[in-house]
Amino acid sequence: MFLPLHDRNPITHIRFPYVNYALIIFTTAIFLIQWLLPAITNQQLIISLGMIPLVVRDVVPAPLAMVPDQLTLITYAFLHAGWLHLITNMLFLFVFGDNIEDALGHFRYFLFYIGSAILAAGAHLVMNMASSAPLIGASGAVAGILGAYVVLYPHARVFVLARIIIPIPLPVPAFWFLGFWIVTQIFYAVFTTGEPVAWWAHLGGVSAGILLALILKRREVKLFGGR
């Protein structure tokens, strides 16, 4: 298991990644509300705001309609199933999101994040069209950030916590760490079934992130860390 700790990749176009920190704070606040709610109420919230493929496709009515069905393609990304789910996503967002906000600008980064969430949910929907289980979590949007990071900063040094025998912090190039992460997502998406992990949402998010980074990046930001 590898977890990112920080990267050696200072921001150069913005003074502070306001949007990235706002996303982390808002998402964490939503989870704290979930955590404080009674279990049955939290489950109702997940059913209402999670993305359910059969509901979005209008095959079945929404069990508890708090928002229009199509809006759940966004709202699902701000709910989480537990502390580990939240902390892992927010850690990746903290380490990599500031550089993507720097490369895109504040407003375009927000559009990028929401766009990645929508396209990740779309990929999950296409590959799970008969599913009645709600999709939740920022993983798809975060996967978009990882996809963008790979094509914009592949040679940046990322310090990861590698658990081999004991946890060891190691500096590795971003393309090694994120490339390994992407390959594992492909493997699990193709070869595993029945697990409560939205592998196709992760792959959809990565693909969306690469595409949106090409469209939304600043003109002076070069691909693959070029100057």
Image (spheres, grey):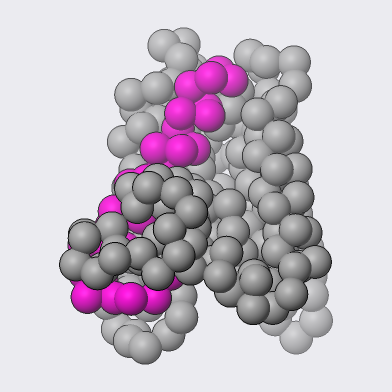
Q: In the rendered view, does 168 fall on the left or right side of 102?
A: right
The stretch drawn in magenta includes residue 128: yes
Q: Position of residue 4 (x, y in %)?
A: 68, 57
Total marks in image: 0
Specify the quadrant of the image occupied by residue 106: top right
Q: Residue at x 29, y 53 (%)?
A: 122
Q: Position of residue 36 (x, y in %)?
A: 80, 66
Q: Position of residue 218 (x, y in %)?
A: 46, 15
Q: Residue at x 42, y 85 (%)?
A: 195
Q: Position of residue 223 (x, y in %)?
A: 40, 27
**Magenta segment, which residues?**
105-134
Indicate whether 101 appears above or below 198: above
Assign the magenta stretch its main secondary structure: helix
Q: Nearer the viewer, residue 160 or 92?
A: 92
- In the picture, which quadrant includes the N terminus? bottom right
The stretch drawn in magenta includes residue 211: no
